[in-house]
Amino acid sequence: MRLHRNLVFATVDALNEIFNNGEYADKVIEKTLKRDKRWGSRDRSFIAETTYDIVRWKRLYAEIADVKEPFSREDLFRIFAVWCVLRGLKLPDWPQFEGTPVRRIKGKFDELSRIRKYRESIPDWLDELGVQELGETKWTQELKALNVQAPVVVRTNTLKIKPSELAAKLEEEGIETSNLRNYPEALELKERANIFRTQAFKEGFFEVQDASSQRVAEFLDVKPGMRVVDTCAGAGGKSLHLAALMENKGQIIALDIYGNKLKELKRRAKRAGAHNIDTRSIDSTKVIKKLYDTADRVLIDAPCSGLGVLSRNPDAKWKLQPEFLDSIRKTQIEILQKYSRIVKKGGKMVYATCSILPSENEKQVQLFLKTEEGSQFQLKKEKKILSHESGYDGFYIALLERNQ
Ligand SMILES: C[S@@+](CC[C@H](N)C(=O)[O-])C[C@H]1O[C@@H](n2cnc3c(N)ncnc32)[C@H](O)[C@@H]1O
């Protein structure tokens, strides 16, 4: 592969914004890709994938390149050179790469690969926390899996189309997919592609949604005609799935503290042809109180550390702070106590996170069950999905039932 100057420079600029200005990788990449209309799909995927790769391996590469944050432009080129050498790519003879110590880079990589926090490129505190929570063996396996680029999985919108028909439509548009065993509505792309450009997407035939995430709405055991409250609906990935499982019958009330996310949900619902979703922004405690004891089903897709989705969001490793984890755990237990009151007697509730830490998952559920609100619930079943076991995102899902 020959490296093109403008693509490498665009990547280095993107890294500068992410590492030095604290910008989010996905936003920076989106903006960078708009820079030159002549870039084709290969050029675009070079920028996106290389940037993500270097974000993922920041600690390891910076250590090998012997550079420290904040990175100068020269440092960023040294990090880029490490990426090239470790991928076996020939460095171009540009001044930025003059004197790159190729053999030393390879030697240092071998040496650092013996130490997990470098090999898996993770901050010390997070590595220690992972061991504490999951134990040495599981954490080592999980961390490795979370450093592999995530596959692209879509969920068929069964309100509009069957999975087999969707697969055929995508194939007509040059995108090959395969079925996933045990995930009835999921299709996995055989090769990465910009699926949002397809006609099938514009027509609302699918949503991009990881296979593990597709388990969440399924777990809630909804039926057409029910009244369901999705309390942390965000942009509505799970609400849309619930609408499909309910065949557009009954009512879904989608809540979030951020109105702009709910606006996006509405846009997606329109595209998907999901007509039974009503959005409400939580701008006072009244919004929740009015709903007490009214829902057949409640979904709490709780805000969390996002440690189960590091493979698609590697910059979370660097953005996450111990203080944030402490405060999010408090939010989770408060949410459980407050929003569980929306479930009517005999109704069911799912608590889910995209975290792999027991302290955000089963321990929170156990804590909740000991509270006054929780004493009215029974834990029916729970699923801990680890990435190294499933091949998809790490998730936790618990189904609870309120006593009659
Ligand atoms: C894991 S995300 C939800 C993802 C969404 N359910 C989906 O499937 O696309 C968690 C959501 O909780 C929201 N949130 C945070 N604190 C909240 C609170 N106290 N009450 C309700 N929602 C909250 C966040 O804005 C975020 O959208």
Image (cartoon, helix red, strand yellow):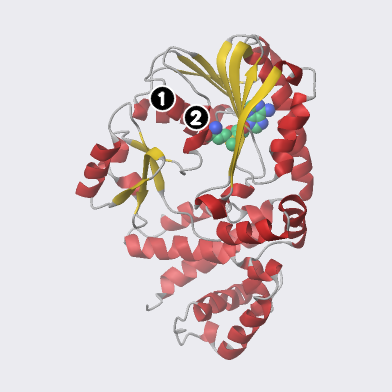
Q: Quadrant of the N terminus?
A: bottom left
Q: Earlier in the sequence, mark 2 or mark 1?
A: 2
Residue at horizontal 69 percent and vertical 46 percent from the top: 357
**Location of residue 125 (image quadrant):** bottom right
Instruction: List x then y, in percent, for residue 275.
Output: 38, 18
Query: In terms of depth relative to the viewer, which is nearer, 339 or 13?
Result: 339
Residue at 56% across / 58% down in the picture? 145
166 sits left or right of 73 in the view = left
* Amino acid residing under circle 2: Ala
Category of crowding for the residue at label 2, using alpha-carbon neighbours closer than 10 angstroms: few (below 14), some (14–19), many (at least 20):
many
Secondary-structure class at tag 2: helix
Residue 238, placed above or below residue 122: above
Q: Is residue 42 above or below residue 199?
A: below
Q: Position of residue 232 (x, y in %)?
A: 59, 28
The residue labelled by disc 1 is 245
Q: Secondary structure at mark 1?
A: helix
Relative height, residue 204 to residue 38 (above, below): above
Find residue 366 and report its horizontal and vertical position in percent. Answer: 75, 31
In this figure, which residue is indicated by the disc labeled 2? 217
Residue 36 as seen in the image, left or right of residue 143: left
Instruction: Residue lying at the far left in this picture: please name it.
Output: 172
Residue 322 appears left or right of 94: right
Q: Name the kind of residue labelled 1 in the image.
A: Leu
State the residue in front, 182 or 9: 182
**Residue at image point 47% right, 13% down:** 226
Location of ligand 1 given as a quarter of the image: top right
Neighbours of disc 1 within 10 Å: few (<14), some (14-19), many (20+): some
Instruction: Please state the horizontal and vertical placement of residue 114, each as a whole percent of the image.
Output: 68, 76
Instruction: Check residue 303 in the rendering and tell me which mark sits there, or answer none.
Output: none
The quarter holding residue 383 reads top right
